[in-house]
Image: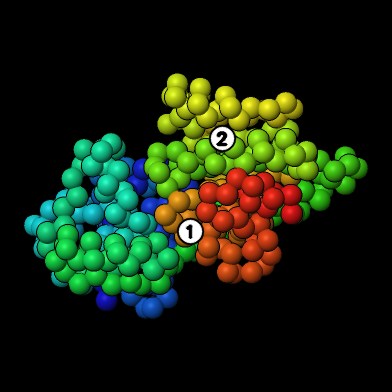
């Protein structure tokens, strides 16, 4: 079948989970023997800002240039703007829900982060990643869309990470850590990365910061610095700085607020590790990127707890500060 997948070409391919979901779905469909084309919803830009060598892998077409309708269009990165567009470009239109939708809609009803309205008219079905969308959300989506709503297996692909590593000559985390340790002939302190989005109740740096302070006070975890990523939503917030950040400061521990970075680049930071925290979710793509390149990861993901490979030992439950501190010392 001729299959189209919506893609929003903007910023880095590593700037959010949307692009990785697009590639993961595209790779799966190619393996199943379908002809896959990426549908460019951003007519002003032909590709993301990086990974240009990946442009040769998938054909692309601008939304306005589609002449013959696809057999199926999977709306992954963004939904289409109206029913007429769906009817023009697709015989069937399937909205792929890749993360919890109910919490997002509740939050946007209070603090709208976008003025773009979601249009669901003309959809054929809704497919939801099974590890990301809960059962009560299926009923919500059925009521909202009035079309069949199905759970499908969660998909993720290491293709972006592997190609980026190949292009930049990045080793695995363990190779850098061993080399630097042998060169300096001493055990180095850990460098902690906290990379929650800080723009949703499901992903905040608050619990990791408090846990880091706790483990520092216990003096059982050698850490001197940390980086707070995706810091734009909080770095100018007086409430955050006075009521969270200031209370998490402790002696011999310095923090730096930075923007979004590629997870895979952290293998070059000797003794780097990630302290992650989620609410209302089981997994996020960046956690899988970290696991793929071997970056140590302390997490509260029930899904990662079950995969083995030693990561069950770095799991802490829910919002447990003491549990996170204990996991850091494992």
Name which quarter of the figure residue 114 lies in. Answer: top left
Q: Earlier in the sequence, mark 1 or mark 2?
A: 2
Q: Position of residue 240 (x, y in %)?
A: 47, 27
Compared with 306, 51 (above or below) is: above
- Residue under the image location 44 percent in, 56 percent down: 281
Q: Residue furthest left?
A: 84
Residue 315 relative to residue 152: left or right: right
Few, some or many residues within 10 Å of mark 1 (<14, 14–19, 20+) = many
Assign the C terminus to one quadrant of the image. bottom right
Task: Name the mark on residue 297.
Answer: none
Residue 14 relative to residue 63: left or right: right
Q: Which residue is mark 1?
A: 283
- Residue under the image location 36 percent in, 43 percent down: 10
Q: Position of residue 42 (x, y in %)?
A: 27, 45
Residue nearest the viewer, comparing 154 with 72: 154
Few, some or many residues within 10 Å of mark 2 (<14, 14–19, 20+) = many
Measured in 3D between alpha carbons, the distance from the residue under mark 1 to the one under mark 2, in whole angstroms, is 20 Å
* Coloration of the structure image: rainbow
Q: Which residue is mark 2?
A: 228
Compared with 103, 241 (above or below) is: above
Task: Count numbered badges in the picture.
Answer: 2
The residue tagged with tag 1: helix, strand or loop?
loop
């Amino acid at each position: 079948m001729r299959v189209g997948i919506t893609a929003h070409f903007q910023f880095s391919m590593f700037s959010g989970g949307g692009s990785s979901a697009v590639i993961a779905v595209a790779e799966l469909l190619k393996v199943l023997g379908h002809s896959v084309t990426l549908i460019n919803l951003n007519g002003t830009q032909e590709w993301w800002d990086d990974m240009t060598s990946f442009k040769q892998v998938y054909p692309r077409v601008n939304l306005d240039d589609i002449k013959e309708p696809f057999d199926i269009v999977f709306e992954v990165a963004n939904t289409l703007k109206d029913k007429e567009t769906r009817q023009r470009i697709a015989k069937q239109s399937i909205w792929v829900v890749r993360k919890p939708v109910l919490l997002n809609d509740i939050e946007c009803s209070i603090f709208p982060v976008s003025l773009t309205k979601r249009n669901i008219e003309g959809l054929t079905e809704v497919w939801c990643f099974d590890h990301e969308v809960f059962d009560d959300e299926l009923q919500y989506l059925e009521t909202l869309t009035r079309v069949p709503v199905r759970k499908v297996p969660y998909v993720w692909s290491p293709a972006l990470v592997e190609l980026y590593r190949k292009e930049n000559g990045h080793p695995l985390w363990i190779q850098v850590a061993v080399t630097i340790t042998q060169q300096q002939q001493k055990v180095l302190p850990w460098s902690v990365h906290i990379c929650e989005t800080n723009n949703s109740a499901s992903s905040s740096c608050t619990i990791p910061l408090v846990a880091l302070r706790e483990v520092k006070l216990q003096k059982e975890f050698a850490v001197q610095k940390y980086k707070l990523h995706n810091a734009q939503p909080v770095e100018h917030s007086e409430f955050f700085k006075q009521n969270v950040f200031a209370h998490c400061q402790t002696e011999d521990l310095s923090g730096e607020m930075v923007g979004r970075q590629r997870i895979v680049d952290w293998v070059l930071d000797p003794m780097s590790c990630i302290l992650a925290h989620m609410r209302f979710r089981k997994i996020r793509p960046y956690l899988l990127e970290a696991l793929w390149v071997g970056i140590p990861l302390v997490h509260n993901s029930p899904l990662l707890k079950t995969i083995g490979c030693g990561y069950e030992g770095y799991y802490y439950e829910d919002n447990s500060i003491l549990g996170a501190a204990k996991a850091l010392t494992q």
